[in-house]
Image: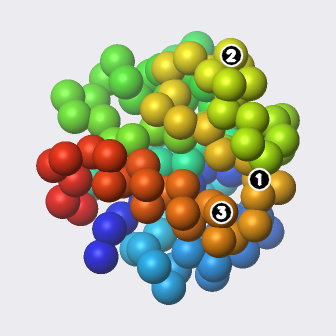
Amino acid sequence: MKKIAILDDYPDFCVVMECLLGNYFEVCALTDTNIFLEKVKSETYSLVLVDLTIQPIPELKINNGCDVIHYLKQNLKQPPLLILFTGWVARNAVVEGKKICPFADGCLAKDADIEQILEEINKLIASRPHSTS
């Protein structure tokens, strides 16, 4: 089963996403940015979903989800697919997401229905040829 991680500042959203995606993936959803970074550094994930609004880490110059994505791209030898997952863009607004976070491998809108989210996650994972986790 593929492993995905989620970072979101809203605990209830994390619980909902774990429930909805848990039938298809091994899901680790966290609200604490420090714990999230440690998990992603120490475990192998196929894909991570990062909300734009997160708990900042000033000493690492991480103020938002885009900073988390940039940090992971710079500090992991083989980063997972890094997806901005936010309510700041509307459904089908991948172009807007790329403007917000050019380092992201993709962008998903939180207002998408679960079928759309699953379809996009599966498409993104399938696009990476050596995705084994």
Task: State left or right for residue 89 relative to residue 23.
Answer: right
Q: Name which quarter of the figure residue 79 lies in.
A: top left
Tags 1 and 2 in contact by the CB under 8 Å rule?
no
Q: Residue at x 47, y 69 (%)?
A: 27
Q: Which amino acid does label 2 sit on?
A: Lys
Image depth: mark 3 or mark 2 in front: 3
Q: Residue at x 19, y 47 (%)?
A: 129
Task: State left or right for residue 26 relative to residue 97.
Answer: left
Q: Could you tell me if residue 25 is visible in this image?
A: yes
* Residue holding disc 2: 99
Picture coordinates of residue 11 (x, y %)? Answer: 75, 63
Residue in the foreground of this view, choosing between 55 and 13? 13
In the displayed structure, 116 sits above or below 124; it is: below
Residue 110, numbered label: 1
Inter-mark Cα distance, 1 to 2: 17 Å
* Residue holding disc 3: 116
Label 1: which secondary element: loop
Label 3: which secondary element: helix
